[in-house]
Amino acid sequence: MKRIAIIGTGFAALSAARRLRQLDKQVGITVIGPRPELVFLPSLIWLPSGKRRAEDLRIPLQNFFARNRIDFHAGEATGLETGGRTVLTTGGPVDNDGLVIACGGRFIKKLPGIEHAITPCEGIAAVERLREAVRAMQSGTIALGFAGNPNEPSAMRGGPIFEFLFCLDTQLRREGRRDRIGLTFFNPMPNPGNRLGEKAVARLLGEMLRRGIGTRLGHKLVGFEQDRVKTEGGEFPADLIVFMPGLTGNAWFDATDLPRSPGGLIKADAQCRVEGRERVYVAGDAGSFPGPDWMPKQAHMADLQAEAAAENLLAELNGGRPENIFKIELLCVVDSLDAGMLVKRTPEGGLALPPLGPMHHAKAFFESWYLRRYR
């Protein structure tokens, strides 16, 4: 029996596993990760307000694995051998006939003083620290911003920062504290969120203006101190800093001979094949893929890449040609606790709707619908 190994338990990894099982009822599948658990990162934005609790976002995967006859190997990847046919992990080696690398990326934490900033997409613990810090504030300023990887235009995650910004504004207004706690958005680009499209940028900046959110744009970041953000255009006070750095590859990639992009991610083609490797694929934040510079690092894009990777890997295992090209599509709802802005972009065009109440409820419904398959 042929066996496929998948590194990771996030969106790309689980979408690949699910698609593989849909297409082939017999192939062996082993998922490798520290814990048999999915953390639903898109809903981290609702932790500070109490709309979600930590336990709502941790999804045990034992039932999903059992239903789909998927083996779980507990361990963190540390390297590869024999051209990818063996995955080295802290829990021992895992042999395979085909491999999907879907372990996500790593935030670049090189700015001086970055230890003073909270990086919310690092997970539940980081956002719980943010929640407690906001609860303790009586007055002051919260500064929120993001940056990219200068060598990898797509390796940034700015959307969640917009959501944390707007959700905190709504939360503080509901609590009657917004007049005492200021919000400042900062970004080294003059038009932040440009990958969402020009209309989306205009709507986002317009929403900040309407809500009285300050902006510091267009100046390269220099670093952080405990009570301030420093840029080449000057510094400004911040009692709490929330910052999303750019993404690069995982540290364990350095112990392999995997081909890397200038930004440190694994180089892949439009079929998600790792360059120069036989039956080795990559999906999601770990990979560098051909496409427009606005191609996002988000769960939806990871799902699309993972499905293409699964289909192509099975074709290759069965002696066929991997010809499925992943669809390029940015799709998100920028939420604000009481409304949401729908943003969509494809190579053919895009749209950005104004904030609408029903979009907030649609985002919550999508969470329930998406997670049902894994519960």
Image (spheres, rainbow, N blue to C red):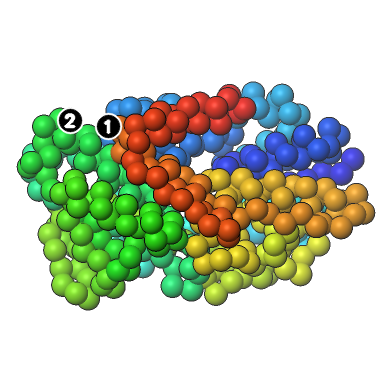
Q: Residue 364 location, x and y as percent? A: 43, 29
Residue at horizontal 25 percent and vertical 61 percent from the top = 186
Residue at horizontal 58 percent and vertical 42 percent from the top = 11
Quick check: marks 1 and 2 in contact, CB under 8 Å?
yes
Amino acid type of the residue that numbered disc 2 sits on in the rendered structure: Arg
Q: Residue 266 location, x and y as percent? A: 62, 64
Q: Looking at the rendering, which quadrant does residue 285 occupy?
A: bottom right
**Disc sitting over residue 294 in the figure:** none
**Disc nearer the start of the sequence (1/2):** 1
In the shown orientation, is residue 71 left or right of residue 350? right
In the shown orientation, is residue 371 left or right of residue 246? right
State whether residue 280 appears in this view.
Answer: yes
SS state under label 1: loop
48 and 96: which is toward the camera: 48
Q: Quadrant of the N terminus?
A: top right
SS state under label 2: helix
Q: Looking at the rendering, which quadrant does residue 274 occupy?
A: bottom right
Q: Looking at the rendering, which quadrant does residue 358 occupy?
A: top left
Amino acid type of the residue that numbered disc 1 sits on in the rendered structure: Ser
Q: Residue 94 location, x and y as percent? A: 74, 48
Location of mark 2 (residue): 174
Location of mark 1 (residue): 49
The crowd level at tag 1 (other Cα within 10 Å; few <14, some 14-19, many 20+) is: some
Residue at horizontal 60 percent and vertical 28 percent from the top = 374
In the shown orientation, is residue 306 left or right of residue 57? right
Q: Residues under labels 1 and 2: Cα distance?
A: 10 Å
291 and 133: which is toward the camera: 291
> How many marks do you count on the picture?
2
State whether residue 117 appears in this view.
Answer: no
